[in-house]
Amino acid sequence: MSQDAPLLIVEDEPKIARLMDDYLSSHGFNVATLGHGDDVIPWLQQHPTTLVLLDVMLPGKDGLTLCREIRQAWPAIAIIMVTAKVEEVDRLLGLELGADDYICKPFSPREVVARVKAVLRRSQALAEQAHTPEAAVSTPVTLNDDGWQALANGHDLGLTAVEFQLLRVMMQSPGRIFSREQLMDHMYRDNRIVSERTVDSHIKKLRKKITEALPEQEIIRSVYGVGYKYQPEG
């Protein structure tokens, strides 16, 4: 699976950069590495790439600043944030800035390869969809806002108002990862105080109802440590 455009690794720890480079190269990827944040934008201006593995803590420009700048200048480039900082706020901030995925150190090299392949597949699918004028987002579930109904293959899922609202929010942005806090804001407009476990409970019930109607499909997916997303298969 040789890649023409190199993947860019931005990592200031030489041992980690070398490990990722070696493992990705052994799986057929063409790889370039940088160790300083200030070198990233000039490099991208001269070299086409499909994906950047971007460390958060860098000398010069930090990874979060770079993530924002890359996303604004090159929307098609996929970004996977890599960090030793596991605080929830960093995860959410990275994803809200436009990152496609997030990996925390220490990590398995196999995990890095798997994440890279998954993100590239997703990016390629989105690009193909964007270049197909008549293509529509295929979804096994349709919503009737007037009746607060969710239909799967024509069958009413029997959702509660909160479950319907959760599903509607995620369906409006397929593939986007929502944090539990963001989902709570949509669920309860009166700013009541509820725990994140409340969101998990509603998601569990929503998934159960969808699975009963669509047993072969998982369309609401968990993103470990971050939240949930609506992503139909196919």
Image: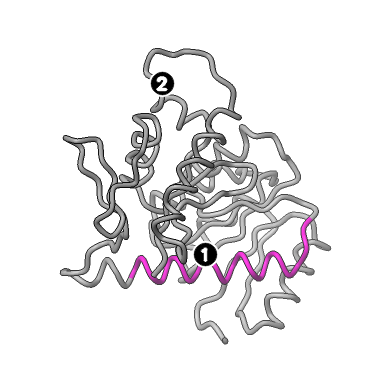
- Seen from the viewer's position, the closer of residues 218 and 20 is 218
Secondary structure mostly seen in the magenta stretch = helix
Q: In the image, residue 30 lies at what x, y percent? A: 60, 79
Q: Quadrant of the C terminus?
A: bottom left
Q: Quadrant of the N terminus?
A: bottom right
Residue at mark 1: 119
Vertical order, 62 against 211 (above or below): above
Residue drawn at x 60%, y 30% is: 197
Label whose residue precedes the other's in the sequence (1 or 2): 1
Residue drawn at x 32%, y 60% is: 140
Dot 2 falls on a residue whose secondary structure is loop
State left or right for residue 22 relative to residue 1. Answer: right
Q: In the image, residue 14 lies at what x, y percent? A: 80, 61
Magenta extent: 107-127
- Seen from the viewer's position, the closer of residues 50 and 41 is 50
**How dense is the environment of label 2, judged by Cα within 10 Å: few (below 14), some, or many (20 and up)?**
few
What label sits on residue 220 in the rendered view? none
Residue at mark 2: 188
What type is the residue that disc 2 sits on?
Answer: Tyr
Labelled pair 1, 2 in contact (Cβ < 8 Å): no
Whether residue 120 appears in magenta in the rendering, the answer is: yes
* Residue 58 shows in this picture: yes
Whether residue 70 appears in magenta in the rendering, the answer is: no
What type is the residue that disc 1 sits on?
Answer: Val
